[in-house]
Amino acid sequence: MLWLYSNNISSIQPGTFRELRKLEELDLGDNRHLRTLDPETFQGLVKLQSLHLYRCQLSSLPSTLFRHLFSLQYLYLQDNHLLYLQDDLFVDLSNLTHLFLHGNRIRVLSENVFRGLTGLDRLLLHMNRIHQIHRWAFRDLYKVTILYLFNNSLPALSGETMSDLPALEFLRLNNNPWVCDCRARSLWRWFQQFRVSSSEVSCVMPADRKGMDLRFLPESDFLACPLSNPNQVRTSTFSTKTRWKPVGPNNGNSNEVLRGSSNSSLNNLYGLADGKMGTGEPNPSSFYKDLQSNDIYSPKYDSPTEEEDYWASYGSEDGRLRENCIGLDCPLNAGTDGASQGLGPRCLSLAVLLHIWLLLLQPQGL
């Protein structure tokens, strides 16, 4: 493993990690001057299982950034400035099980945004600005058991879209501006037919249903609604590519997919524990300075493996939720744009850090 978090890294040369073919974990998180990544940044990391890019200032990701990372299982992209996700960004990540995208500025989930994620188990999208989800956005996510969409700007969500998640067990949809008219019929019907542990789905409109929970509205409220789905997305901006089929690194043989060993560093970075997500962020140069790996706030902290421990903080939410703001109405965390953080120490050269690391390991080899 290679940990380079909180180092004020500002740029990474293409192919920097090319020779680290046995590397299984790479942590580049909390480098808040890291604004862009080259498409070939992670070239050659064929055994990489865990990649940390949390709390940088990334606003976009090259469409081929994660290509050929067939062994990747954990991808941490939370607390960046991502505005959108390109189609097929994750198309080679059929072994990915955990994808963390919360705390960004994503507005739309397009048709092919999650194509290829056939092994995904947990998808965290809360604390974004999502106002539209394409009907087929979740079509490859048939193994997802945990989905967080709370504190976005969703007025409606198609029940047909949710039907593409047959393994779903835990769902969070609270703190969205739900419109509980005919547009909500298909989602309401999905809740009647599918049993899942869910948060409340509180209506904001129409006025006579404000504050009511969509899940428990009587069927009579929807009797006058047409049978067709009024929430179907009609736009020419979404891709119309054919559905992706899993392809591993074995020359297109879909029956042979790499199965990496389980990753031992499932970090406590869900953005929910102890209500810390809405608090002010510390200086990146000192955040982890004195923390041990077993400290709950360290990026190296191994979260509990038992489900009851994992869901112990299920009801806890950050400060912005308690302020009753929703999606676009929520102020950004102070200092997240870097304007108030200051430049701090001079940005370090990743090449220098990597050279030192290689010298230290030279006697044992990689």
Image (tube, helix red, strand yellow):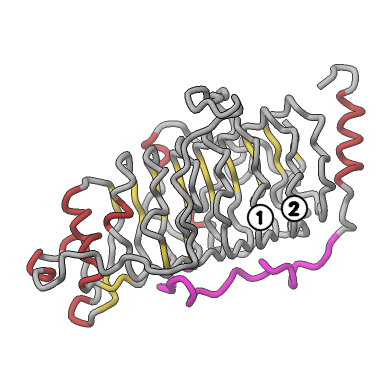
Q: Amino acid at mark 1?
A: Leu
Above or below residue 165? Residue 189 is below
Along the line of sight, the residue nearer the viewer: 162 or 262: 162
Check contact, mark 1 vs mark 2: CB within 8 A.
yes
Is 249 on the left or on the right of 230, as rendered?
right
Magenta span dominant secondary structure: loop
Q: Who's the residue at 74% across and 72% down the image?
A: 340
Please state the horizontal and vertical placement of residue 27, each as a whole percent of the image. Answer: 70, 41
Above or below residue 4? Residue 127 is below
Please state the horizontal and vertical placement of residue 91, each as a whole percent of the image. Answer: 55, 43
- Residue extending farthest to the top is 364
Q: Quadrant of residue 243?
A: top left
Q: Earlier in the sequence, mark 1 or mark 2?
A: 2
Secondary structure at badge 1 equals loop
Above or below residue 240? Residue 131 is below
Which quadrant is home to the N terminus?
Answer: top right
Q: Who's the residue at 55% across and 54% down the image?
A: 87
257 inside magenta stretch: no
334 inside magenta stretch: yes
Q: Amino acid at mark 2?
A: Leu
Is 192 on the left or on the right of 127, as rendered?
left
Q: Who's the residue at 92% across and 28% down the image?
A: 359
What label does residue 61 carry, if any? Answer: 1
Q: Who's the residue at 75% across and 67% down the image?
A: 341
Please state the horizontal and vertical placement of residue 202, each as a whole percent of the image. Answer: 28, 67
Which residue is under mark 2?
37
* Label 1 crowd (10 A; few <14 / some 14-19 / many >=20): some
Please state the horizontal and vertical placement of residue 119, each as a whole percent of the image. Answer: 46, 35
Which quadrant is home to the C terminus?
Answer: top right
What label does residue 32 carry, if any? Answer: none
> Magenta region: which residues?
320-344
Is 136 on the left or on the right of 216, as rendered?
right
